[in-house]
Image: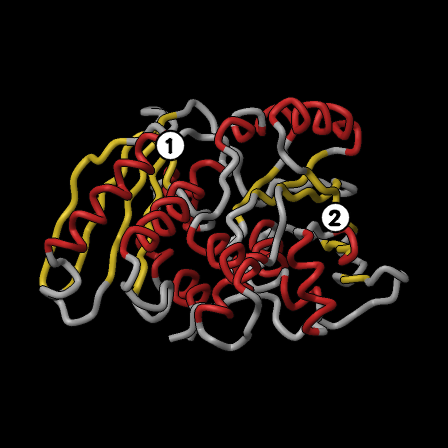
Amino acid sequence: MNESKIINDYLKKLVINNNSSLNLNDDVFFDKSKKTVISVDTYIEGSHFIDFKKPELVMKKIIRSSISDLICKGVLPRYYFIAGAGDRKSFSQSNLKKILRSLRQEQKKYNISLGGGDTVFSKKLSFTITTIGYSKKIINRNNAKLDDDIYVTGNLGDSFIGLTILKKKIKVKNNLKRYFENSFYRPSLHLSFSQKLKIFANTTIDISDGLITDLEKLMNKQKLSYRLFIDRVPISNQLKELIVLKKLRKELCVSNGDDYQILFTARPSKARIIRNIAKSFGVKISKIGKICSPSTKPEILDQKGIKIKVKTKGYIHKF
């Protein structure tokens, strides 16, 4: 049993005559008449973050991960609600001061405000974040067009390496260690640029579970296929260095999620305006593939144009 099967086989039976739910096929709820957009995310210690030794960094991670759902829809987040479940150690006075300081910083950075929440005792630490924004329109999933170009913002893979380092599965020198761990805890969100998405994007999603997994989610109800060029997938100079140093496979590094970059498709005629807007906002934009006819099987090609197999497409929630 996985998340998709639970939603499709069970939960969808509960959303009849509720268009705002978007048939549970998106990461947000959108009430068009009230111009209200809502997302909900839960984070569990040991799963979404390793431990709570650095509460100030964990809070930055979960807040940014949560508001990313709205940002990729072209919606500005306005309020967030936080429900925390934990024990006395997790919510000690020392930790609470660090949490408060971190949340204040995130509120100022992204112009959001705490709306409310809940706290309960639990031996297992978890947080649930509800984010609310307002907009007349959002960019839906499943609206890709044949021959659309596939784009992504920023760099991919740094967060995965950061998590791998935190898990002590790989050792690197201190400057690289700091860089990758920072990428894991502080994903870079393109708030201002996202407000221009509606001008050119046909469909969007944030990369949380992995590049390929999220691309397939983006178009899962459409009879379309895709072609991805792995050499065009953007990575940082630090990751390029590490790939050579540790003999890593690029496709593995960029397919494991937690990047929270924006993945979107657009008509080829929009290429110039995309470049100009990206340049004006100082956002790195990369064209990494193409939406293809359903008669063509999905392809992931290396720099020589040879089809490659990827061991993991991304994270899948299994139960």
- Amino acid bearing label 1: Lys
- Amino acid bearing label 2: Ile
Label 2 sits on a secondary structure element that is strand
Label 1 sits on a secondary structure element that is helix
Side of 24 where 313 appears, left or right? right
User: Which is more toward the observer, 26 or 316?
Assistant: 316
Q: Residue furthest front?
A: 174
Label 2 sits on residue = 288
Side of 283 where 11 appears, left or right? left
In the displayed structure, would residue 272 be above or below residue 123?
Answer: above
Query: At 55% across and 75% down in the image, what residue appears?
Result: 170
Query: At 90% across and 62% down in the image, what residue appears?
Result: 304
Alpha carbon separation for disc pair 1 and 2: 30 Å
Label 1 sits on residue = 109
Q: Which mark is residue 153?
A: none
For disc 2, the neighbor class at 10 Å (few under 14, some 14 to 19, many from 20) is some
Of the residues tagged 1 and 2, which is closer to the observer? Answer: 1
Question: In which quarter of the view is residue 102 placed?
Answer: top left
Residue 1 position in % (x across, y down): 42, 75
